[in-house]
Amino acid sequence: MSLRRLPSEERLLAYAAGTLSPPEAVVVATHLALRPETRVWSDLGQAVGGGVLEDLEPSALDAGALDKTLALLDLPEPQEPTVRLDKTDPTLPAPLRGFELGPWRWLGPGVRVRDVLGPRDGDCRVILLKIAPGQSTPRHTHGGVELTCVIEGAYATESGVFEEGDFEEADPSVLHQPRVVSSKPCLCVAALDGQIQLPGRMGKLLAPFVKL
Amino acid sequence: MNAAQGDGGALITRIAETQDRAAFAELFQHYAPRVKTLLVRSGSTPSAAEELAQEVMLAVWRKAHYFDPKRASAAAWIFTIARNLRIDSLRRGSSALYAVDLNLGAEEPPQPDAILSGMQDAQIVRSAMQTLNPDQSQAIEMAFFQEQTHSQISEALGVPLGTVKARIRFGMMKLRAFIEREAGVAS
């Protein structure tokens, strides 16, 4: 079987249905922005959502629901809550531009990480990772699901090369050590569930200092 | 109601162009009760669903100028607004994200013509859904309700997770192939 670098059809349907967790949805949306050809599946999911909606039994509404709504039509639209623009990055793909970002943190030689603030689901959250050419992240296994989308550059794992727009779903049983193979730094967005577990002696040594 | 015959898009366009309140009322009568059902089946209480359904229709009025009948059917577009407002109401921090999907793909290069024109045709989409076998159609419909993860669907149906994923995957492929074929014939 060839290496898959797109989200699965079932994950894209869950994205369209709005049932993915927010961190997972952010990574899928980034992939969709960089790879418009995948949008056919999420658009299809939305089209099916329309079909599902159309076929539902109507529920009775409160008396006067329509009049109540009609009375609101001419009111000014409430302002959307705004983010602090100086904390966002307009050079990121569109789905990431609306989020404030935490400061870059050091995570080992040539590896930096920053939080994408907002999308969370329990322990699952979104980070940006920037890895210098030729560098690897420490070998690690995953506590939970890790979804990654490459924004710039490219990395290689045991299973293959991932380039701009590619989407990777990490298998929790696999030891993971992505290594940057592009000449420029590799920038990725990832949804992490739980803490990354660094195996071995090096992992034990680093664990108190490295908080992903 | 004409929205059921595929005229919902024309009503939204009338709202966008002339703030047509009669068009809005017609759209409301058809879709608000269905949006309420969708929200209840997604886990909202009936009173929260009632309030949210009215908010969804208000958003349809305010965002009508984003609607592009060449990209989405009225039902798919209203479904997407309902989905976004439901996510917002859960306050899980992703509202900034889904706004992108409302103007379905405006920034992107167009999809291949057949699939695109097929997907905005509510009739073709519903005919496609009728070609699914019962297992595929059940797995796909369940994915839309109650925050169902694929593992929860697997538990509810008593079939392995891999089977649920395969039913969804093959169902989606079948829908796509049918829509492309139908739209290709029609054009």
Image (tube, grey):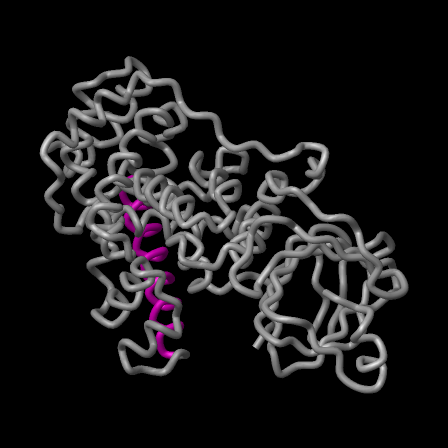
Q: Does the segment drawn in magenta span residue B107?
A: no
The answer to which image quadrant residue B107 occupies is: top right
Residue occupying the point 37% across, 42% down: B85
**Residue A185 visible (yes or no):** yes
Q: Main secondary structure of the magenta part?
A: helix
Query: Is B12 left, or right, of A80 in this rendering?
Result: left
Residue A72 coordinates in the image, percent (x, y): 27, 22
Give above or below for A176 relative to A44.
below
x then y, percent, for residue A165: 64, 53
Single out the residue that lies furthest toward the top.
Answer: B18
Q: Position of residue B53 (x, y in %)?
A: 25, 40
Residue B67, quarter of picture: top left
Q: Nearer the viewer, residue B152 or B143?
A: B152
Residue A35 appears left or right of B160 = right
Q: Residue A4, how many percent across, how many down?
A: 58, 68
Q: Quadrant of the N terminus of chain B?
A: top left
Q: Is residue A52 visible?
A: no
Magenta residues span: B163-187
The C terminus of chain B: image quadrant: top left
Q: Is residue B117 left or right of residue A35?
A: left
Residue drawn at 12 percent across, 38 percent down: A62
User: What is the tally of numbered marks visible in this picture?
Assistant: 0
Q: Nearer the viewer, residue B49 or A11?
A: B49
Horizontal arrangement in the rendering, residue A77 relative to residue B108 (left or right) = left
Q: Residue sitting at 58 percent across and 55 percent down?
A: A27
